[in-house]
């Protein structure tokens, strides 16, 4: 018996979400007295680092045909690894990859699946958020094989200091139903779903020409930029920056919302952030109710002051 963790990679490097899933899986393995084994698909390096989060063995399927993401192919490979290692629990990060692969695998293995887990399981019961983060649900998995996808930034990563053995795993890779011809990246900016800090702007910024200060603040803080939906709809910012119910759901450690009212549909995508800072001229803006820190003020006055303060702090 074992706990198998799907550790995803981006450009050949393990993602932050992969380490979180590894740590989650290792903690489950510890409580169930089994081993935490990770599986990595495609060209990748630095896999031994998973050992620091409790993984004892990494199965590497280093086939370049898996470099382009294909959930159908990867699910087939993970299913073979699960069988080879007699995995009873399979853990995914609840990110782009996990959201696509876990349901396919669940159907393949006839396994119960809980998506977006917030905490370690209590026996067979896993807690997740429902109703756009407004409520929790405790879900019991009754199947022999259990699949859990872990919400990013929800469970502490435990550094155990161990080292993982890397083993080549040879799997039968099915023929693809689709062919990825080319991937064109929209930008080289920090991934919004992986960023620790996000600086986000809304309609209160009046126009796209005013995003220079948002980008400057984000750059100084090593943050990604985001926006509210109307801002993307009216083409002030690209659609991939839109967060909320109909956009990306993010859970950074720090979310700075500037000139955003805090409508429920916006909050649905950001209310899992650890700390929320709101800058808005209207003291009655709904966002202040969800904020940890609030500044009632004009963004065009407050943000330049923040930029100056961060610069001063960094140069000190
Ligand atoms: C089905 C559905 C799905 C939706 N999905 C999403 C979604 O995924 N994401 C999303 O964001 N929205 C979504 N919306 C839209 C949502 O309801 C709000 O309309 C939207 O979030 C408002 O965007 P905003 O806060 O940028 O703009 P506004 O509501 O116009 O708010 C602008 C804010 O800026 C403040 N402000 C003005 N001037 C300044 C200044 N100089 N300095 C500081 N503050 C200032 C104002 O006080 C105000 O609070 C959805 C709506 C529906 C119906």
Image: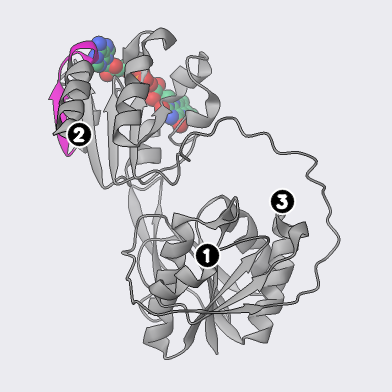
The answer to whether residue 107 is magenta is no
Q: Is mark 2 within 8 Å of ligand 1?
A: no
Q: Is residue 300 magenta?
A: yes
**For the point 45% across and 18% down, which residue is it?**
231
Q: Which of marks 2 and 3 is in front?
A: 2
Which quadrant holds residue 244?
Answer: top left
**Where in the figure is residue 236, as x and y percent of width and height?**
48, 14
Label 3 environment density (alpha carbons within 10 Å; few <14, some 14–19, many ≥20): few
Q: How far apart are marks 1 and 3 (CA)?
A: 19 Å
Badge 2: residue crowd in 10 Å (few <14, some 14–19, many ≥20): few
Q: Where is residue 137 in the image (x, y as percent from the top left)?
A: 38, 61
Position of 122 relative to 156 (above/below): below
Residue occupying image coordinates x 64% and y 60%:
101
In the displayed structure image, the side of residue 250 where residue 180 appears, left or right:
right
286 above or below 275?
Answer: above
Q: Indicate which disc residue 314 carries.
A: 2
Q: Earlier in the sequence, mark 1 or mark 3?
A: 1
In the image, residue 62 above or below residue 304: below
Name the residue carrying label 1: 46
237 or 306: nearer the eye?
306
Q: Ligand 1, what quadrant?
A: top left
Dot placed on the residue nearer the N-terminal end, 2 or 3: 3
Q: Could you say whether the residue bearing mark 2 is in a helix, strand or loop?
A: helix
CA gap between label 2 and label 3 equals: 39 Å
In contact (CB < 8 Å): disc 1 and disc 3: no
Q: Is residue 125 visible?
A: no
Q: What's the magenta region?
A: 292-301
Name the one closer to the observer, 238 or 47. 47
Residue with the mark numbered 3: 68
């Amino acid at each position: 018996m074992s706990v198998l963790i799907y550790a995803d990679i981006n450009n050949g490097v393990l993602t932050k979400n992969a380490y979180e899933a590894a740590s989650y899986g290792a903690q489950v393995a510890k409580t169930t007295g089994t081993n935490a084994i990770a599986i990595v698909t495609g060209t990748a390096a630095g896999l031994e680092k998973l050992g620091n989060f409790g993984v004892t063995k990494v199965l590497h399927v280093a086939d370049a045909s898996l470099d382009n993401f294909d959930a159908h192919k990867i699910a087939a490979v993970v299913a073979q690894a699960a069988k080879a290692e007699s995995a009873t629990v399979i853990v995914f990060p609840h990110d782009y990859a996990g959201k696509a692969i876990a349901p396919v695998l669940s159907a393949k293995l006839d396994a119960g699946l809980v998506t977006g887990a917030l905490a370690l399981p209590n026996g067979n019961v896993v807690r997740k958020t429902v109703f756009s983060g407004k409520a929790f649900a405790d879900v019991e998995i009754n199947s022999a094989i259990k699949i859990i996808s872990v919400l990013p930034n929800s469970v502490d990563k435990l550094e155990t200091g161990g080292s993982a053995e890397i083993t080549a795993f040879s799997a039968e890779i099915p023929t693809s139903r689709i062919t990825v011809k080319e991937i064109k990246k929209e930008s080289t900016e920090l991934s919004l779903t992986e960023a620790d800090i996000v600086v986000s702007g809304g309609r209160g910024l009046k126009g796209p020409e005013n995003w220079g200060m948002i980008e400057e603040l984000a750059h100084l803080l090593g943050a990604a930029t985001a926006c509210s939906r109307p801002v993307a709809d009216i083409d002030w910012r690209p659609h991939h920056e839109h967060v909320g119910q109909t956009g990306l759901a993010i859970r950074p450690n720090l979310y700075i919302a500037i000139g955003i009212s805090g409508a429920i549909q916006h909050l649905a995508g950001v209310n899992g952030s650890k700390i929320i800072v709101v800058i808005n001229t209207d003291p009655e803006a709904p966002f202040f109710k969800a904020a940890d820190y609030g500044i009632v003020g004009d963004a065009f006055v407050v943000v330049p002051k923040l930029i100056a303060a961060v610069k001063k702090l960094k140069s000190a």
